[in-house]
């Protein structure tokens, strides 16, 4: 009986000690689960993600994104939960690597492009390319484009400085010579060409002329360059440049003047009736 009692008492002590160890092990496991382990999938995040956080057992905020390695606010179990294992095939052994932050790397600047304006103020730019994109919360890329001002002065700029003189198409310059003089009959007739302008500015004096009243701001007008008005370069003075503001004046309406932008041109054509012509 004494032996059995002693054995029972010894067995009880072993049970108490075992229960104590199990309780301590449970507390350790509970503490080990704090942080990234407690997160729902995905437990870990790449880059910088302020939503990828968890609370420790002490209710402190810790992060499970790769950027936390730079800021030093990773959860305690980040390395154990979020590190990536890569099989090294050549050595045949398991190698463990962390998702290290990779900063952006860019190449050198390219050459400056041509000035955006053929004549007058404009801008030019240059670019550079990304050679290594940022990953895992690395430093983002700097500016990839630079722009600066420029002043264009193309050989065609002289045309932009010319002022067009215009009249209504009722002032036709072509006429039949009643005397049929040979030098008039033998004169080469050059085909007309048409230009469409968008009026940008018109003075108040234009309202005084019947034909100049339609010259309103943002109105599209067709101007015909007839062969008789062409100069030595087979073009009319003041016919302007594409997408460039130039100036005009109404020949028969004093004070009527303004600016416009040439939108298109067409060879060998005539404008519709009640349009304008170059003088």
Image: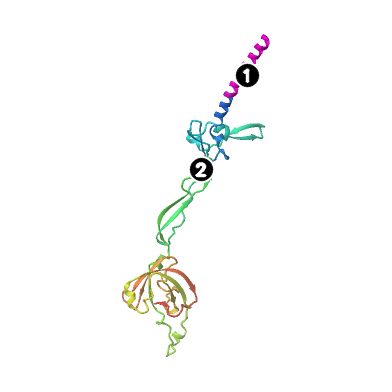
Mark 2 Cα-neighbour bin, 10 Å: few <14, some 14–19, many ≥20: some
Report helix, strand or loop for mark 1: helix
Mark 1 Cα-neighbour bin, 10 Å: few <14, some 14–19, many ≥20: few
The magenta stretch is: 1-23
Between 22 and 107, the one nearer to me in the picture? 22
**Residue 267, above or below 80:** below
The percent coordinates of residue 214 (x first, y second) are: 38, 75
Disc 1 to disc 2, C-alpha distance: 63 Å
Between 261 and 38, the one nearer to me in the picture? 38
The percent coordinates of residue 245 (x first, y second) are: 40, 66
Between 2 and 201, the one nearer to me in the picture? 2
Residue at figure coordinates x 46%, y 86% from the top left: 185
User: What residue occupies the far top of the structure in this picture?
Assistant: 2
Residue at figure coordinates x 36%, y 79% from the top left: 210
Q: Quadrant of the N terminus?
A: top right
Residue at figure coordinates x 41%, y 60% from the top left: 152
Q: Which residue is mark 2?
A: 105
Which numbered disc flags the more N-terminal residue, 1 or 2? 1
Q: Which residue is mark 1?
A: 15
């Amino acid at each position: 009986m004494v032996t059995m009692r002693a054995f029972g008492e010894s067995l009880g002590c072993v049970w108490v000690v075992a229960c104590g160890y199990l309780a301590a092990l449970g507390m350790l496991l509970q503490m080990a689960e704090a942080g990234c382990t407690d997160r729902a999938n995905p437990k870990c995040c790449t880059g910088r993600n302020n939503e990828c956080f968890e609370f420790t057992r002490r209710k402190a905020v810790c992060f499970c994104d790769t950027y936390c390695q730079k800021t030093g606010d990773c959860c305690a179990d980040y390395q154990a939960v979020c590190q990536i294992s890569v099989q090294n095939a050549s050595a045949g052994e398991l190698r463990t690597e962390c998702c290290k932050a990779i900063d952006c790397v860019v190449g050198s600047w390219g050459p400056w492009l041509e000035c955006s304006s053929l004549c007058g103020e404009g801008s030019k730019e240059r670019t550079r390319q990304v050679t290594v994109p940022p990953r895992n919360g690395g430093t983002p890329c700097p500016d990839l484009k630079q722009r600066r001002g420029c002043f264009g002065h193309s050989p065609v700029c002289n045309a932009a400085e010319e002022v067009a003189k215009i009249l209504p198409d009722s002032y036709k310059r072509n006429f039949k010579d009643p005397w049929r003089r040979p030098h008039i009959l033998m004169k080469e007739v050059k085909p007309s060409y048409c230009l469409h302008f968008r009026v940008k500015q018109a003075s108040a004096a234009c309202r005084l002329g019947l034909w100049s009243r339609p010259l309103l701001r943002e109105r599209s007008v067709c101007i015909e360059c007839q062969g008789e008005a062409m100069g030595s370069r087979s073009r009319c003075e003041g016919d302007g440049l594409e997408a460039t503001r130039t100036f005009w004046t109404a020949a028969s309406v004093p004070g009527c003047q303004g600016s416009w932008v040439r939108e298109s041109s067409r060879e060998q054509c005539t404008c519709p009736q009640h349009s304008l012509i170059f003088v």
